[in-house]
Image (cartoon, rainbow, N blue to C red):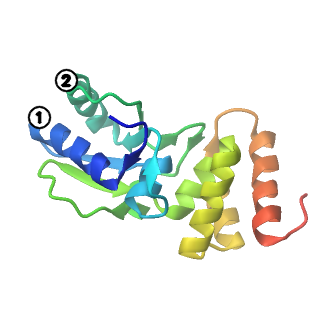
Amino acid sequence: MSSELNNSKLLDFLEELDKELDGKITVVAVGGTAMTLLGIKPSTIDVDFNMPGEDFEKFKRILGMIPHGFKVDTYKDGVVFSQILPADYIAKSMLVKTKLKNITLKALSPIDIIVTKIGRLDGRDKDDIEACIRKFQITKNQIIKRAKQIQYVGREENYEINLNHVLKKSFMVDEK
């Protein structure tokens, strides 16, 4: 399997998992996986999902049964990388139309993709943030408002510095 996963390969992978499930679960794609499913970027190098705690163990069990050959990171209950999203993250996520019977597939909302990528903010994250801002016309105020609602696991000053950097680069505002 190639190192890059496009929309089709992601959905094929999920169809295999879906066949093994014996009940319904909700899976929210995050990071590059969400961006690929939303058509913001053509492919992702790894697979990142979040899901409610009650679905997490079911998903992990099935994931272990299906050989897939690529890196899959799973998070639960709104934890994404080093951030904890507000409880409404699933409701704000966008439904991805699929033929899956047992998996309700959603992609993290573009604003939540941005605020979770701000925590790490490597070169790829910066590009991804810019792509989300452009495609979905995200405003500076939307980012500020949502960023105030998340919890950052680690040194909060680091998140503030990254947030101010993104605002400066994306909206030409002075860094604090």
In this view, the residue in front, 34 or 75, is 34
Q: Which residue is disc 2 drawn over?
A: 65
Give how far apart the Cα atoms at labels 2 and 1 are. 9 Å
In this view, the residue in front, 154 or 125, is 125
Q: Quadrant of the N terminus?
A: top left
User: How many badges with numbers are in the image?
Assistant: 2
Q: Quadrant of the C terminus?
A: bottom right
Is the residue under label 1 in contact with that under label 2 (CB below 8 Å)?
yes
141 in relation to 10, above or below: below
Q: Quadrant of residue 155?
A: top right
Q: Residue at x 37, y 31 (%)?
A: 70
* Location of residue 149 in the rendering, given as x and y in whole percent from the top left corner: 61, 55
In this view, the residue in front, 55 or 72, is 72
Q: Residue at x 19, y 23 (%)?
A: 65
91 in relation to 43, above or below: below
Q: Which mark is residue 20?
A: 1
Q: Does the image show residue 89?
A: no
Q: Residue at x 55, y 72 (%)?
A: 135
Q: Residue at x 13, y 37 (%)?
A: 21
Which residue type carries mark 1?
Answer: Glu
* Location of residue 17 in the rendering, given as x and y in whole percent from the top left corner: 19, 38
Label 1: few (<14), some or many (≥20) within 10 Å?
some
Which residue type carries mark 2?
Answer: Met
Does label 2 or label 1 sit earlier along the sequence?
1
* Location of residue 78 in the rendering, given as x and y in whole percent from the top left corner: 46, 44
Q: Does the image show residue 55?
A: yes
